[in-house]
Structures are given as C-alpha cells and as structure tokens.
Amino acid sequence: MVADEVRNLAKKTQESTVSIQNMIANLQSGSERAATSMQETLGKAQAGASSVVRAGELLEEIAEGIASISDRNIQVASAAEEQSLVAEEIHRNVDDINSLVIQVSAGAEQTAVTSRELARLAEQQQGLVGRFRVS
C-alpha cells in the first residue's frame, strides 16, 4: 500500500513536473513573442519618430517657401505700384501734349487765316501799285 502511494505520488509528481515544464515552455514562448512584439513596436516607433522629424523638416521647407512667395508678392505689388505711378505720369504727359497740339493747331489755323489776309492785302496793294505809273 505504501508502495502504491509512493507510485501514485511519483506519477503525480511526474505529471506535475510535465505540467510545470509545459507552463514554463508556454511562458518562455509568450515571453519571446512579447520580446519580438516589443522589438517590432520599437522599430515602428523609431520609424514613426523618423517620419515626424521628416514631416517637421518638410513643414519648415513649406514655411520658407511661403515666406519666399510672400516676399515676391510684396516685390510684385511694389513694382505694380511703381508702374501705376509711371502710367499716371504718362497719362498726364499725354494730356499735356494733347493740350499743346490743340494750341499748335489753333496757332496754325490763325497763321493760315493771317496768311490768307496777307495774300489778299498783297494782291490789293499790287492792284494799287499797278495804277501808278511813272512816266
């Protein structure tokens, strides 16, 4: 009877040992999977951090591009304002030239009238001179 109990105890001990070994194997396997998963997560986190750094660099480049475009827009606005001032000056000059042309035209017309009058007077004087003859 003692031998049976010892055998049963040995059998239970062996079963318990196998069960404990299986549990240890499962724990080791789970630990390895957890470690692998942690390594993968670490790699993804590092890749994510790299992406965040690159995104920051790209945002900085975009901000620089926007600043450059803003500067160019200011230059274009300044040039447009200068061109507008020049166009106004040209317009004033054209108006002045137009006024001068009108004055010159009026003067030319007056000169033509005066010339016709002088021609008429010259003809009249020739007619008067033709009446006088020296003998």
Image (spheres, helix red, strand yellow):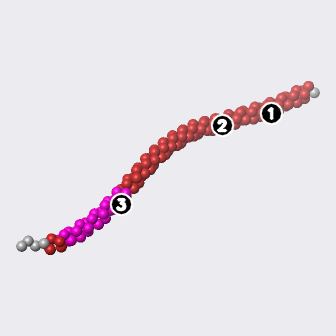
The CA distance from mark 2 to mark 3 is 89 Å
Residue 30 coordinates in the image, percent (x, y): 73, 35
Stretch in magenta: 99-126
Q: Amino acid at mark 1?
A: Ser
According to the picture, the residue beneath numbered tag 2 turns out to be 41
User: Which residue is identified by label 3?
Assistant: 102
Helix, strand or loop status at disc 3 = helix
Q: Position of residue 85 (x, y in %)?
A: 43, 48
**Alpha-carbon distance for marks 2 and 1?**
32 Å
Residue 43 in sight from this viewpoint: no
The amino acid marked with disc number 3 is: Ile
Task: Specify the quadrant of the image occupied by residue 120.
Answer: bottom left
Which residue is situated farthest in the left direction here?
Answer: 135
Q: Residues within 10 Å of mark 3 (few under 14, many from 20)?
A: few
Residue at image mark 1: 19
Nearer to us in this view, 36 or 115 = 115
Residue 53 picture quarter:
top right
Q: Quadrant of residue 133?
A: bottom left
Q: In this view of the protein, can residue 20 be seen by the observer?
A: yes
For marks 2 and 1, the one nearer the N-term is 1
CB within 8 Å, label 2 to label 1 = no
3 or 1: tag closer to the N-terminus: 1
Q: Is residue 118 magenta?
A: yes
Element on which disc 2 rests: helix
Q: Quadrant of the N terminus?
A: top right
